[in-house]
Image (cartoon, rainbow, N blue to C red):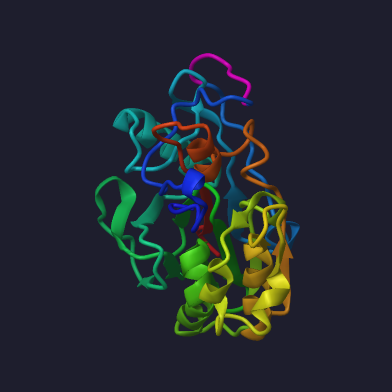
Amino acid sequence: MAHEPGPVTAAETGAETGAETGAESGAKAPQGPQPLVSPLLSPLLSGVPGVAHGFFTRQGGTSWARGDLNCGLAADDDPSHVDENRRRVRDHLPAQALVSLTQTHSTEVVSLTALPDWPRGRGPEGDGLVTRVPGLALGVLSADCGAVLAVDPVAGVIGAAHSGWKGTAGNITCALIDAMAGQGAEPARIRLALGPMIRQASYEVGPEFPDHFRGAVADHWRFFRPAARDGHFLGDIAGIIAAQATAEGVVHFEDIGGDTYADPDRFFSARRSAHQRQPDFGRLISAIALQRGN
C-alpha cells in the first residue's frame, strides 16, 4: 500500500516508505534491465472502447540488480531508473502523460480538467484522481494496498484510487465515485476494477484492527475471520472495497485477484519486506487512460 501494510503485530511493523532492493528471498532474480512485461488486465475494463489500462507487475523494468519496474518517485532508487520505468508504462498504454499523487492514505480525490505541469508527473497530496482529459494516464502506487481503476464509458470519465486499509476505512471508493459523478458519471454506469493486493490469507491483524471499519461498511465483522494466533484476525480488505462499491450503486465490479504478499516474483509487498527485515521496497503502478480521439 503506498503505503502502509496496516496495523500489525509487534514483529510486523513497518510503513511503506521506500523501495525494496530487489534481493528479497523467494523472488527469482534476473540480472540488469529487463523488457517490459505486459500488465495484468481487467476484462471488465478491456471491453470499453477507447480506454487503456493496466495493473503492472514488478517485472520488466530498470531498477536494481533484477530489473524491477519500480514506479515510486519517493523510493530509494536511482531517479533515472524510476523515470524510465514510468516512461515505459506511459508508452505501453499509450498516453501523452502519466501522473500520480503524493499518496497519504487519505480520502482526497483530485479532479483534473487539463494536463497538469507536475515535475516528474508527481502531484500534490491525495489518493484518488479523476479526469475526462484524453491522453492523460492516471496512476496509483501500491505495495499491498488496493489499486482501483474505474471508467464511465458514457460520460467518458476515468478514475483511479489507492485504497490501503486507512483509505478503505475512510471509504475512498465512495469519494472516487462522487468525484467521477462531479464530471458527469453515474454509479450504475461505472465499471470498477480492483487489482492485486494483499489478500485475507496473508493479512493477519491484531484484535483492535476490525474496529477501524465500524461504519465504513455494513456488518464489518463478516470481513474478518480468526487467525491461528489467539485474538488475531485475517482481514479481507478487498471484500470491504467490493462491498463499498456496491453500496454506492456500482453494479459493474471486478476483482482480478492476485496476492501481493504471496507472489514475490510478480509483486512488491511492504509486509513481506518488513517480515524479511529489508530496509526498503518498490512500488507497483496501476494506470488508466482515455485514448486520444475518444
Of residues 200 and 289, which is closer to you in this image? 200
**Residue at far front of view:** 230
Would you say residue 133 sits in the magenta stretch? no
Q: Position of residue 131 (x, y in %)?
A: 44, 69
**Residue at far top of view:** 31
Of residues 121 and 77, which is closer to you in this image? 77
Q: Position of residue 260 (x, y in %)?
A: 62, 44
Q: Position of residue 80 (x, y in %)?
A: 32, 29
Of residues 141 and 208, which is closer to you in this image? 208
Q: Residue at x 62, y 78 (%)?
A: 244
In which quadrant is the C terminus drawn?
bottom right
Left or right, 75 with reference to 265: left
Q: Residue at x 58, y 16 (%)?
A: 30
Decide: is 154 above or below 203.
below
Residue 209: quarter of image: bottom right
Residue 29: quarter of image: top right
Q: Which residues are magenta?
A: 27-33
Instruction: Look at the image and tell me whether residue 176 can be seen.
Output: no
Query: Which secondary structure dominates the residues rendered in magenta?
Result: loop
Decide: is 129 above or below 184.
above
Decide: is 294 above or below 88.
below
